[in-house]
Amino acid sequence: MSKEKAKTEKKDEDVAWLDDHGRQFGHFIDNKWTIPENRKTYNTICPSTGEILASTVQGEKEDVDLAVSAARRAFESWSKASGHYRARILYSIARHVQKHMRLLSVIESLDNGKPIRESRDSDIPTVIRHLYHHAGWAQLMDMEMANWKPIGVVGAIVPWNFPLMLLTWKICPALAMGNTVVLKPATYTRLSALLFGEICAEAGLPPGVFNVVTGAGSVGSMLATHPDVDKVGFTGSTEVGQLLRRATAGTGKKLSLELGGKSPVIVFESADLDSAVEGVVDAIWFNQGQVCSAGSRLLLQESIYDDFVQRVKSRMSHLRLGHCLDKTIDMGAVVDESQLKSIEELVQSARLEGAQVYQMNAGIPKKGLYYPPTLITGVQTVSRVVVEEIFGPVVVVLPFRTAKEAIELGNNTKFGLAGSVWTENVSLGLEVALSLKAGSIWINCHNLFDAAAGFGGYRQSGYGRDGGKEGLYEYVRPRWEGRPAVHSSPVDFKKFGDTIPSRPTFENVDIAQLLIDGIMLPTIDRTYKMYYGGSQQRPDAPYSRPIVSPSGKVIGHVGEGNRKDIRNAVEAAHKAAPGWGKRASHNRAQIVLYLVENLELRRQEFIGRLILMTGCTEEVAKQEVDLSIQRLFHWGAYADKYGGTVQETTLYGATVKVHDPVGVIAIVCPDDHPLLAFVSLLAPAIVRANCIVIIPSQKHPLLALDLYQVFDTSDLPGGVINIVTGDQDHLTKYLTEHQDVQSVWYFGSAQGSAFVEYTSAENVKRTWVNYGQSRDWTKPDQGQGEEFLYHSIQVKNIWIPMGDIYAN
Amino acid sequence: MTTNVGRDFDESWLANVHINLPAIKRRAESLSGRRTVKKQWQAAWLLRITTCIDLTTLSGDDTPSNIQRLCCKAKHPIRYDLLADMKVAHLDVSCGAVCVYPNRVADCVKYLKSIGASNIPVASVATGFPAGQTPLQTRLDEIRFAVSQGAQEIDVVINRHYALTGNWKGLYDEVREMKIACGDAHLKTILATGELGSLVNVYKASMVCMMAGADFIKTSTGKETVNAILPVALVMVRAIREYFRRTGYKVGFKPAGGIRSAKDSLNWMILMKEELGDDWTKPDLFRIGASGLLLDIERQIFHFVTGRYAAVHELPMA
C-alpha cells in the first residue's frame, strides 16, 4: 500500500507559525518574547525525519531571575484576584486552545515524533479537559478549599514525552489556586510550551502569570533552587526527581514528583483475550512506550500464556510505524538518538541473559529514530529488563499461577505508578485493583487520563497528584501557615545523627516515697521499655537515658534506641499493616474510641505526669489531657469518613478514588505538648489504616510510654503503634534511611528537617517536616487540620469501564 | 565433587556411641557467642553461603511458572547492581542447586539450560518424600525417574521405622540400593532428625547412611515439627568427622528446614568451620536447604552496600 502521501497531514499552516517567528525562539516572559543576547542556541528537530524545526535559546541564570521576578510581581495581583476572575481566564485559555487545536497537535507531533492521531485525539483533548476542569476549581476555591491559600511562585519542570499535556497538568491547578508559574520545558521539546505561552497571552492571561524559560537541565536546577520559587512541580525520571529533592531540602519549598514506572498489565484467563491484546497495544505501544505509566510488564496467567503470547505476536505483525504526521500509523519515532541507544542496550542485556526477543521489523522507515515494537519472553523477576524502566516500546512477559501471585509479582518493584487488570470477573478485578500498590489502576483498559482523576505514584514513582481535587493540595498551603524561613546554616548530611551525644550524669535522682503502715518506703522501681509488635521490648543495646524534670531531678530512665530497634519496629509495623488495613473502618474507629475511654479512666494520672515532666500548672495539664481526649474523638470520627469518592471523569463507568493508607509512617514528635502533639500525630495516621513507628518527645517521653498500657487494654492490634525512645536525631537518621518506611513526619529542628528531606530522596519517601518551626497544637486548624488527612493517605484512582447493553 | 563409595555394613561402628545432651547444647549455644563475622567479612561469608544454598520449592502448587522464576533466581541470587557495587559481578555468584519434586526436574533442566545455567545442578527429593512410607520398589523407581529426567542430586528420606526399631542393617541395605539407583547422581540422605527420638539414633543413622554411600547427610525434610537445629547438627557433623577419620571420605552436610535468617545461616557456617574445617564451608561439602533464607541474605547484602535497610518489594522475588 502506498497511500502514505495522501494520509500525511498537510503541514503548511503549521510551518507558517514557525516561519512567523523566523524559526527562532527566545523565552516567553511577562507575555513577551525575550531573546537575550550572547546565549547558546539549541536546534529542536523532528525525530521522524531529523529535520531542524527551529532554533531556541539555552537560558542562563539571568533569564531564570527575570522570569521568576515577573512571576513574583504577577503573584501580587493574581493571588488576590477573585476565584471567578481566574476561572474566566482559564476558561478563555481552554477556548483558545480549542481554536488552535490543529496547530498545537501538529507542532507537538513534529517536535516529539508522536503520531498525529495521538496528539490530536489524546494529548490535546486532555489539555482542554484540564483547563476546563480547573477553571471550575478556581471558581470554587473559596468554597471547596476554604482553609487553604496559594503558595506563591511555582517552578514547573516537565519532560519530553507529553510536552504540552504535562505542562498543563502543572499549570492548571497552580493557576486555579492563585499561584504564578515559571515553566522549563524539556530540552528536546520546547515548541508547544512556547506556543502555549503565546496562546495564554492571547486569551487574556495577565503578564507574568505564566512564563516559559528554555534551556538545558541546568536551567531546571536553577529554577528549582531559586530562592523566590516556593514550589517545584516536576514530572520526569526518578533520578532527576531525587536530585531535585536533595537540591531543595530544608528550604521550605513544596515539592511534588511524578516519576518513572514499571507498570504491570495483568491478564487473567477470565479476560476477553482479543480485547486484552488491544489493551497491550494501548499499554506499551502508545506514544512509542515513552509513557511513565506504560504497561511494560505483561503478567499472564499460566493457563493462557502460550495462547496470549501468540495473539500478541500476530497483532504485532500489523502495527504500522512511520512519520508522525501520517494519520494511520500506530507508532512514530522515539524522541532522540540517546533514547534509542539506551533501549537497545537494555534489550541486548535480555538477549545475553538468554531471553527470547521478538521484534516487529518489517516496514520500519529507513530514516528517522525508529525502534521496533518488542516483546521479550523467557525473562524473570531478576532480569534487568524486568526491574528497570526501559521507556520505549518494549514489553516483558512473565507467567503467574494465581491471583495472589499476580499481585505479588505486580507489586515486586520499586515503582508504583499504574497498572491494569484484565478479567470479566468483577470481584477478581476489584480485589486485584485494590491490592496493587500504584496510583492509577485501570480495569480492562490502560493509559486513560482525565482532569478529574489525579495521576501520580506510590513508592519511587513519586508523590503528589496531577488532576482532581487531590491534585489541588500540591499548590496550596494551610491558611494559618507562612512559608517557613529558610534555614541557612549548612547541615552535614553524612554526620547528622550518626552518634549519640554523651549525656551529663545526673546525681539528683528523685525517688518517690510512699507512706505504708506508718513507714516511708521507696516506690517500686518502674522500668520503661520500648513498645513494638504489641509488647514491651528492651533496647537492642541495653543503654538507658535518664529523663529529667524541670527542677533537674531524674524522674525515670528510658531505653536508648539504635538502628536495630528501628529495624525491629519497622518490621513489626509491616507485619501488622495488611491486617490493620483490611479491618472495617468501623472497627478502627471503635478501637480509637476504646482507647479514649481507657485514657479518660486515667485522666488524673496523666495530668499528674504532665506536671511532673514539664512543670506546667495543673490547669494547663488538664487542658492538654482533655484536648488529647477530644482529638482522639475527632480522628476516631474520621475513620469511616474519608475513604474516597467517585470521580467525574469522561469514562462511561466509574472512576473510583480510593484513599489508601501510605504504609508505614515514621513520626518524630516535638517537645512541646508532649501528650497532645503525640496524640494529634498518631491518631490520624492510624485511623487511616497506617501503621506507625513513633518517637515521642526526647525531653518528655514518659507519657508516651504510660500510654502503651492504655493501648494494650484497648484491643489495639500489636504492631500498629510502635514506640522507640532515645536520641531523636539518631533515630530520625535510621528511620529516614529505612527503605521500607513510606513517609516521615518530623517535628524537630530545622537541621533535622533538612536532613529528613535530603535523605528521603534515596527511596522517594514522602515527608512532612516543620523546618524547626513550632505550631500551636491546641488550635484546631494547626492541630487537626485537613493537612493531617492529606499526609495520612495516598490516592489511588481505579477506572472501571462499564457496558454490556448494545441493542434494544 | 568426590563420591563416597561407602563400605560394608559394620555394626561395631555403632557400638559405644554416647552423647551428652547438655554438653552438646552448651557447645551449640556458645558457638555463635565465641565467633562472629561483621562488615565486609560478613558480606563475603553471606555470598559464600549463597553459593551453598539449595534453592528449594517443594509445594503441591509448583508449576512451570514458579519453577522458571526459581531457576532464574538461582542463577542471579543477588541483585546485579549490588554485586557490581561490591565489585564481585565477575564471580558469577549462583546458588548451589535448585531442589524440587521429581515431576518438576525436567522443567528445571530446561529453564536452566535456556538461561545458560546448566552448571547449576538440579536436586530432586525422592523416595516418598517427606514420610518415606511407600514400598521400597516405588521409592527406588522414583529415584531412577528423577535421574532420567536430569537430576544430578537426589535427596532421599530414610526409613524412620528401621531407625526407631534399631534395624540398622535394614536401613543400610535400603540406602545401599538407593545409592545404586542414583547411578552417577549424588545421594543426599535426609535423616528427619526430628523423628528419630534420640541423639544416639541421629549419630547411628548418620553413620549407617555414610557407610551405605551417602554423599551428603541432611538434617530434615522441612516438614517435621523440629527441623534443622544446631545441637542435632553437632552430632551429625561429628559423625562425619569420625567417618572421615576412619575411611578418608569427606561426606557433606546439609541442614534444611527453618533456616530463614542470614544470621542463622552464619551460625551454621561457623559450626562447619569450627567442627569440620574450611573444606566443609564450600558447596561441594556444605549446602543449606532453604527458600526464604536467600531473601534475607539479599537484604543484608543490600544493607552492607547501601547502609540502609531494604524494602522487600525492591528485591526480585523467587
Image (cartoon, coloured by chain):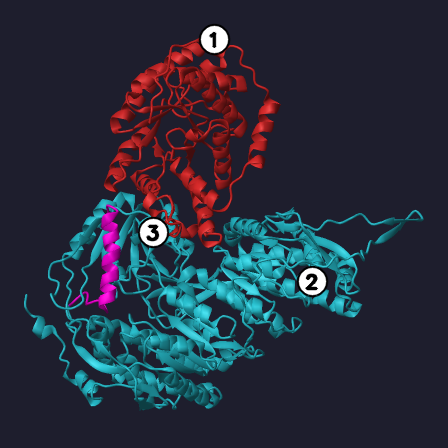
Observer-nearest of A576 and A556 = A556
Residue A483 in the image: x percent, y percent? 54, 79
Name the residue type under label 1.
Ser
Q: Looking at the rendered structure, which numbered label has been put on residue A699? A: 2
Q: In the displayed structure, does residue A630 sit left or right of residue A442?
A: right
- Of the image marks 3 and 2, the number of the one nearer the N terminus: 3
Q: Residues within 10 Å of mark 1 (few under 14, many from 20)?
A: few
- Whole-angstrom CA distance, mark 1 to mark 3, is 68 Å
Q: Considering the numbered disc 3 on the image, is that residue within a helix, a strand or a loop?
A: loop
Using the image as rendered, state which of residue B22 and residue A305 is in the foreground. Answer: B22
The residue pinned by badge 1 equals B12
How far apart are labels 3 and 2 at the CA level?
A: 55 Å
* Farthest right residue in view: A518
> Which lettered chain is shown in red?
B
- Marks 3 & 2 on one chain: yes
What chain is the cyan one? A
Q: CA distance from mark 2 to mark 1?
A: 71 Å
Q: Residue at x 47, y 50 (%)?
A: B303
The spot of residue A140 in percent (x, y) is 46, 81
Q: Position of residue B35 (x, y in %)?
A: 55, 36
* Quarter of the figure with residue A460: bottom left
Magenta highlight range: A329-355
Q: What chain is tagged by disc 2?
A: A
Q: Amino acid at mark 2?
A: Lys
The residue type indicated by label 3 comes to Asn
Q: Which disc is residue A425 wearing?
A: 3
For numbered disc 1, what is the local secondary structure? Answer: helix
The residue that appears at 42% across and 86% down in the rendered structure is A71
Residue A381 visible in the current orientation:
yes
